[in-house]
Amino acid sequence: MALVRSVFYIVCCMVLIGCGGGGGGLSDGGTTPDPTPEPIKINLSLSDSKVSNGNPLEVTAIVTQGGVPVATKLVTFTLDKSDIAIFDKGISSVATDSAGKAVVTLLAGNKADGGTIVATTDTGESSETLAFNSAGDGNVIVGPQIDEIAIFANTLQLASSGAQEIALTVIAKNNKNILIPGADISFSSDSGELLISKDDNEVPSSITNDKGQATAILSTQNNPKNRTITVTASNGSISDEINIFVVGTTVQFSGSSSLAFNDDSTYIINVLDSDSEGVYGAQVSLSLANDPATGAANLSFPSTVTTNEEGQAFIQVTGVTGGTNTIIASAMGATASKAISVQADSFVFTGFNNGDGVAVNPSNGNVTPPDVLLSDTATVTLSWNRSGTPVANGTRVDFSTTRGTLSSSSGVINNGQVSTTLTSNDAGKAIVTFTGSDGNIQLSNQLAFEFVAETVDRLIAQASPNSIGPDGQTSTISVVARDPNGNLVKNKTIVFSLSDTTGGQISPAEAITDSKGSASTVFKSSTGSAQNNITITATVKDQPSIIDTVNLTVADRELFIAIGTGNEIEDNETSYTKRFVAFVTDADSNPVKNQKLTVSSVPDAYYKGRWLPLYDGDEFIRWVTAGEIGTHTPDEHNRDTALYLTSQPPTRCLNEDINLNGILDPGEDTNNSGTLTPGNVISSLATVSVENDNTTQVEAVTDNEGKVVIELVYAQSFGGWVDINLIVSGKVGGTESIAKTTYTLPNSAQDINSEDISPPTASIGMSGPFGEHNSCNGWQ
């Protein structure tokens, strides 16, 4: 029986297996397939069709399946062009939220163009491709993220002549003050020219090096206009800026102070750059200071005039109605004025003889008085007419001059003319003034010319720098020519010759000395040389026995020094403190720490003049330094700029200590003051790294960043009146590296921007600390 039960059990199980395990019910014995899943879809949209710096785009992808939002689906957005736009904060992949939505933000890139964007899921589904445009005005950060930028300049003043360049240095740090290499710094300026150089590996200097520094060079090559250049350094939204002041261009306005009714006279306008070279093609705007409708004289003249190749413009001015008025001449950011009275009298220069066979009539248009040799005697003649008829014989005219000696201090009219002669023992510009008085009539006129030294007694040659690297680096060789009395000698041809076995070159081979007795050439290096093994000789061409030499070294410098400063100045009670920073690197741009340096400050030049207030209509602008003021005194109720500005700029005089030995040597006391001028105006020269304090030279040691902070302290009364040379040098292995910047000692803004506060002075009145007369040959 047990066997039967077992067999029955087995048969039942087999039947169940054959029926499919009991899961089929009343089916035909087959299977039913699962339904086909709905496809995943991506709907892509843009908030706008164009991305710009002020209009970022929001890109939205909505992921659905069968009309139902799909959450936690990773969506990646892809651009076809990486330079027209970037993803905000670098986020290009986002997981969908509960609504199936993934959103990213596009920022404008650096290139203006059209492009496309597409969205793709992590399972391979893609959206349609959408097109958009980019304005290309984005501030895209390239390279590492930085948190702080500081920009420095080796000087804040740029000579308008274009002969100078300013080295700009940017330091990039993160929020932990760690220097950041590889950051791309964007340099920009609102005028001038910026140069970004490249190293041997074609890496631009705008990329920060291993010490976190990026560099650029600023110049003003074809624009001598006085102005402020704002330079900005930026990386993304991080930026810093510095103001560079283009200075040195002046306008000079000369001619008679009086005109007869319906008579005309020629006036000369000179536009000069910082090197006293004429500015060609400068447009001079001319206007009257006072409206003739108020009773002032009406004068007829052109509204604009353009300077010739010598920087001169000649205008004819006609007196229309009686009275006095002032003509304002403005060009290149500089202004000069000329006060003129209109009456029955004509008071003009009609003769000038330089004593060397050249005679001209200054009243004729486009005539400039010729130079006068120190060995010659100049003759100046003036004609005085009233209503077209010479004034009475015996009418007195007084003479004065800013340079030289007059044969007499006055003369009398004879047949409508009066003359005087003058000589000079010292070279330079002279301004002769004739002043006539006849009853209530007061007349004056000025004539400018130059006395010129003719014999060179000594040449002084200097190289800057005297040690340069190979492969095209340059050094400027400058000479100054002086006669036996120390006068600067103009119009002498200097011949430069080179003794060099390394293949270097000099250019030009000849140069003519200017009014400052200066001429120069440039040496361009080839390969390295032994110490001081390159010799350049300067010779006066027509006096071959007068020579001087300089020696140069061409070598791979082991130290590179850069000097910089910022816009700030510390205003103490009676002094200013100005800070500079010097950076020292090796040939691989690595900071050199614990490097011993020598820091010195040497006066380069000083200025003579006085402080004058500058107005724009009735609005006070600031106090400015100006040359010797004219005879016209401004009316308290007429604060026009023209009445306050002299036609002469401050007179720049070179440091009398020619050989920089601090000793008054024969021939150095140009102004006969009995001392060296300006002397050492720096009261304290100190460096933070070394505990020392001196007035001319101190030692310093670089910190871990290869940096030294330098502090100059000087009396406030010297601000605006002295140029100093700040020199930093260091030696490694017997090779010296040197850097120099020339800097006009500044004033704080608060001391010159208030009409109620007079600028700092060292004497009674508004004169500068070295006198105000426009001659370097007198202490006045």
Image (cartoon, helix red, strand yellow):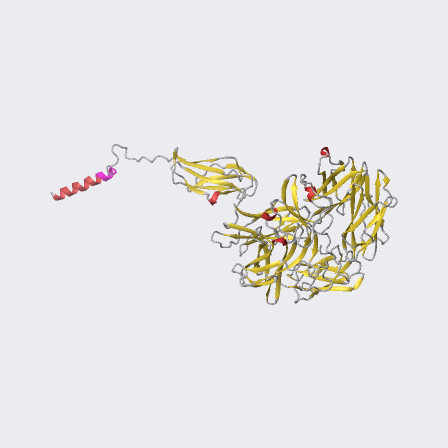
Q: Quadrant of the C terminus?
A: bottom right
* Magenta stretch secondary structure, dominant: helix
> What segment is highlighted magenta in the picture?
15-20
Q: Quadrant of residue 523?
A: bottom right
Query: In terms of depth relative to the viewer, which is nearer, 27 or 724?
Result: 724
Query: In terms of depth relative to the viewer, which is nearer, 389 or 184?
Result: 389
What is the tally of numbered marks visible in this picture?
0
Q: Quadrant of residue 83?
A: top right
Q: Quadrant of the N terminus?
A: top left
Q: Is residue 44 left or right of residue 227?
A: left
Q: Is residue 574 above or below residue 14?
A: below
Query: In terms of depth relative to the viewer, which is nearer, 355 or 240?
Result: 355
> Seen from this angle, which residue lies furthest right?
415
Residue 98 visible, this orientation: yes
Q: Residue at x 47, y 37 (%)?
A: 59
| Residue 597 in picture, x, y percent from top left | 58, 63
| Residue 770 in picture, x, y percent from top left | 68, 55
Query: In terms of depth relative to the viewer, which is nearer, 251 or 103?
Result: 251
Residue 472 visible, this orientation: no
> Seen from this angle, which residue lies furthest left?
1
| Residue 151 in picture, x, y percent from top left | 56, 51
Is 200 within the magenta? no
| Residue 436 in picture, x, y percent from top left | 80, 45
Q: Is residue 733 above or below residue 649?
A: below
> Seen from this angle, which residue lies furthest front?
439
